[in-house]
Image (cartoon, rainbow, N blue to C red):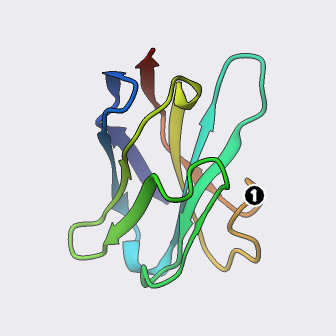
Amino acid sequence: QVQLVESGGGLVQAGGSLRLSCAASGRSFSSFEMGWFRQVPGKEREFVAAISRSGGTKYYSDSVKGRFTASKDNAKNTMYLQMNSLKPEDTAVYYCAAGQNIRVLTTKLGYNYWGQGTQVTVSS
C-alpha cells in the first residue's frame, strides 16, 4: 500500500510559477513509476507528466511540454512538478499517482494509487 499526499497548489497570476510536491509513504518509493494528472469539473482526468522509477525517463503532455518539469527524489520519497509560465487553462485539480510495471505511463490505466489532489488556479 502507498499513500500519496500532494501539496503546493494555490492561486497564481498568468506567467507565474508553482511547484507541486507529492509525498509518498508505505512501500518502497523507488520501485514505483509516478505520474501527474489534472482534472477540471465536467472533464476527464488528463495526463500531465510521468516519470520512470529511476527518474531517468520523463513524459509530458503536449500542452505542458517546455513549461513543466517533473522530478523524483527517491531518497526523500517525493515527486515534484515544477510549473512555469502558467496559463489560465492550467487551472485544475492536480493529482499524483503511482503504480508498478505500468506499460503506458501516459494514461490513467496502471496507476493503482492516487493522492487527494491539490487545486491550482491561474488568473488572467
Instruction: Left or right? Give the position of 15 relative to 105.
Output: left
Q: In the displayed structure, would residue 23 be above or below residue 46?
A: below
Q: Residue at x 44, y 24 (%)?
A: 119
Residue 41: x and y in percent read: 69, 17
Residue sticking out furthest to the left: 76
Query: Is residue 28 visible from the viewing direction of this image?
Result: no
Element on which disc 1 rests: loop
Q: Residue at x 48, y 42 (%)?
A: 115
Q: Which residue is mark 1?
A: 107
Instruction: Left or right? Give the position of 82 relative to 65.
Output: left
Query: Is residue 117 visible from the viewing direction of this image?
Result: yes
Q: In the displayed structure, would residue 88 be above or below residue 78?
A: above
- The kind of residue on which mark 1 rests is Thr
Q: In the displayed structure, would residue 40 be above or below residue 105?
A: above
**Foreground pick, 18 / 108:** 18
Q: In the displayed structure, would residue 73 be above or below residue 95?
A: below
Q: Residue at x 42, y 49 (%)?
A: 4
Label 1 CA crowd tier, 10 Å (few <14, some 14–19, many 20+): some
Instruction: Left or right? Give the position of 88 relative to 13.
Output: right
Q: The C terminus lies in which quarter of the figure?
A: top left
